[in-house]
Image (spheres, rainbow, N blue to C red):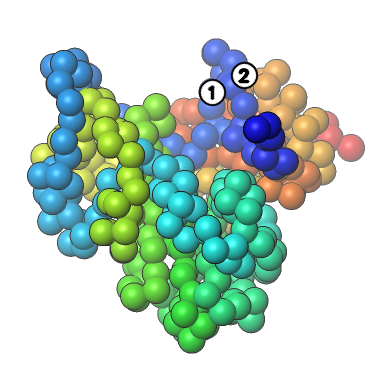
């Protein structure tokens, strides 16, 4: 039997060179105060098998909804493929969004249908028993839709006995964000972005808990992920309460300086040629994200960092537009 590769490639920005200010990854620039203590705890935990049922329950109590812990959103997407895509369902994916949705659908041989990146318009594309992906706030443009704006899409999903998968990876960065509820809604969340620790693959899903636990890989988060969750639960999200206002303040400053708008902690901007712009910023010691893989070859994406770092980005942008044709 021959094993053939899936004919769909994803691009997550590539390996960053050392020494560059990294605006390409949309992360909280402020690390938790307890990060060193967490790594020490992980060393101790690494000497035994990890069982997270009790910790999962504590996290559920903290969040106020029953959650299932996963090794980030990526594992959750694969588990969803195992659970729901075996029957070759139609998978509805908006244009210009996180490309991993399509990759998962292709791996599980689902029928992919592309639709508009607008909840009201996307509602028209919902077919019977389909799976609908919606990134909220959206990656790469940071647009966030309130539960009221999602109402038509949720209704279409309910009327067709479909599933709405809300990717809320960046919802912690949205000021006064609210998330909708519904029996046909699956929410995907991660701690990677809001705690600035992308190497720790820990996230969770809200909804269909028993189904996800039935296919979840044992010990998938390991000792480091477990130690991280211990500190998150103990901290009770105080780190987010402390750092998000700092990010929002800098976000407003960047919006005014560069004439951009977003609901999240990152922006996209039309630079004419993304590849050329990436090289320009690289020479200035700055890494930004080429949005070609999102279907936006004229745009780059960049995140909010600390004030002094943001100043360097703003200065580089001014120089770029001064000398660009």
Of 314 and 238, nearer the camera is 238
The residue at the far top in this view is 18
Q: In percent of the image, x 26 and y 59: which residue is there?
A: 210
Q: In percent of the image, x 18 and y 30: which residue is there?
A: 50
Res 21 label:
1
The answer for how far apart the CA atoms under marks 2 and 1 are is 6 Å
Mark positioned earlier in the residue sequence (2 or 1): 1
x and y percent of residue 195 in the render?
33, 37
Quarter of the view holding residue 112: bottom right
Q: In percent of the image, x 31 and y 63: which residue is there?
A: 208
Q: Is residue 317 left or right of residue 84?
A: right
**Secondary structure found at label 1:** strand
Q: Is residue 65 left or right of residue 94?
A: left
Quarter of the view holding residue 110: bottom right
291 is higher (above) or lower (below) than 82: above
Q: Is residue 251 left or right of residue 207?
A: right
In this figure, which residue is indicated by the disc labeled 2? Answer: 285
């Amino acid at each position: 039997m021959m094993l053939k590769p899936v004919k769909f490639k994803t691009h997550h920005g590539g390996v960053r060179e050392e020494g560059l200010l990294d605006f390409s990854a949309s992360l909280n620039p402020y690390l938790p105060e307890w990060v060193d203590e967490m790594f020490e705890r992980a060393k101790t935990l690494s000497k035994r098998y990890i069982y997270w049922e009790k910790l999962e329950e504590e996290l559920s109590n903290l969040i106020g909804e029953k959650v299932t812990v996963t090794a980030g959103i990526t594992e959750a997407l694969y588990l969803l493929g195992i659970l729901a895509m075996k029957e070759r369902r139609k998978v509805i994916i908006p244009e210009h969004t996180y490309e991993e949705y399509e990759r998962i659908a292709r791996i599980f041989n689902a029928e992919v249908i592309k639709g508009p990146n607008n909840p009201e318009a996307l509602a028209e594309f919902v077919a019977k028993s389909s799976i609908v992906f919606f990134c909220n706030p959206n990656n790469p443009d940071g647009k966030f839709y309130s539960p009221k704006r999602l109402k038509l899409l949720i209704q279409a999903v309910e009327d067709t006995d479909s599933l709405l998968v809300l990717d809320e990876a960046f919802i912690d960065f949205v000021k006064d964000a609210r998330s909708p509820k519904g029996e046909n809604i699956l929410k995907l969340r991660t701690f990677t972005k809001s705690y600035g620790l992308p190497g720790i693959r820990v996230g969770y899903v809200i909804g269909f808990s028993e189904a996800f636990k039935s296919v979840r890989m044992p010990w998938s988060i390991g000792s480091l992920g477990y130690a991280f969750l211990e500190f998150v639960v103990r901290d009770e999200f105080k780190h987010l309460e402390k750092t998000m206002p700092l990010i929002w303040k800098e976000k407003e400053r960047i919006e005014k300086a560069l004439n951009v708008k977003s609901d999240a902690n990152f922006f996209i901007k039309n630079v004419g040629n993304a590849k050329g712009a990436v090289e320009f910023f690289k020479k200035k010691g700055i890494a930004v994200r080429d949005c070609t893989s999102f279907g936006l070859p004229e745009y780059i994406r960049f995140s909010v960092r600390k004030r002094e770092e943001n100043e360097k980005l703003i200065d580089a942008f001014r120089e770029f537009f001064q000398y660009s044709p």
